[in-house]
Image (cartoon, helix red, strand yellow):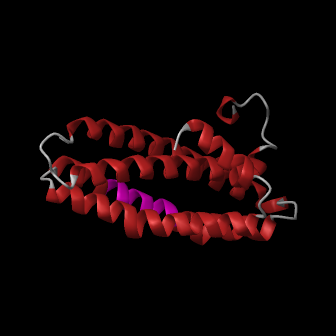
Amino acid sequence: MNPQEINRQLEEMQPWPVERLIAYLRRDHQRFLGKDLTRMRELAEALGMAPLHAFLSTMDSELRGHFRMEETIVFPVIEVMKNKEAGELHPALEYACRHMKADHLLHERHLQVLHSFTSQIDTQQGSELSIPLLNLMDDFASEMELHLKLENNFLFQPFLKFRSSEDPKDS
C-alpha cells in the first residue's frame, strides 16, 4: 500500500464512529498476531532465516503486550468517554494515549528493521517461499502503518489536543 492509498483510506475512515473504529482495530490486532506474524515466522524458519525469525518473535511479544493494554484499558475508556468530557480521568487518559503513541514510534522502527530484512531474502534461488514472505512482509508493514495512523490521529489525538501548543511532542 503506497502512501497515497494509506491517506485515501484514512480519509474514508475519519468519519467512522469510535465503536466502529475500535472494532476494526481489534480485528487488526487479531490478524496481526494470529495470522500475519505467525505465517511470517513459519516462512522465515522454513527459509533458515534465524535472525528474522527471532526478530518476528520479539515483535510478536511486544505487540501482544501493547495490544493487550489498548484493548483492556485504553479502548474501553475511550469508548465510554467518546461523548463526554474526560474530567478527572483526563490526566490518566492523556498519559495512556501518550504512552501508546510512544510505543508506536518503537513499532515504526520495527517496521524499518523488518524492511531491512527484505534485502537478505534471496528470490533468485527459486524458493517458492521467498516471494510469499516478501509479499506478506510488505502487506504487514503497510497495514501496520495504517493501523498506527488510525490510532494516533483518530483515537488518541482528541485526548491530547488540550495539551499546551508549545509541547513539541504533539507536532
Q: Is residue 160 left or right of residue 119?
A: right
Residue ID at (41%, 43%): 111
Residue ID at (69%, 58%): 92
- Judged from this view, the residue extending furthest toward the right is 84
Q: How many marks?
A: 0
Indicate yes or no whether the magenta region holds residue 143.
no
Q: Quadrant of residue 42?
A: bottom left
In the depicted view, which residue is nearer to us: 78 or 4?
4
Above-or-below relation of 161 to 67: above
Above-or-below relation of 129 to 17: above
Above-or-below relation of 64 to 15: below
Query: Residue 129: x and y, percent?
Result: 21, 55
Residue ID at (50%, 65%): 29
Indicate yes or no whether the magenta region holds residue 62.
yes
Query: Residue 70: x and y, percent?
Result: 58, 63
Above-or-below relation of 162 to 61: above
Query: Residue 15: x and y, percent?
Result: 80, 56
Residue ID at (42%, 39%): 109
Q: Quadrant of residue 75?
A: bottom right
Q: Quadrant of residue 164?
A: top right
In the depicted view, which residue is nearer to us: 149 or 5?
5
Q: Main secondary structure of the magenta part?
A: helix
Q: Quadrant of the C terminus?
A: top right
Query: Residue 52: x and y, percent?
Result: 23, 49
Q: Which residues are magenta?
A: 58-67
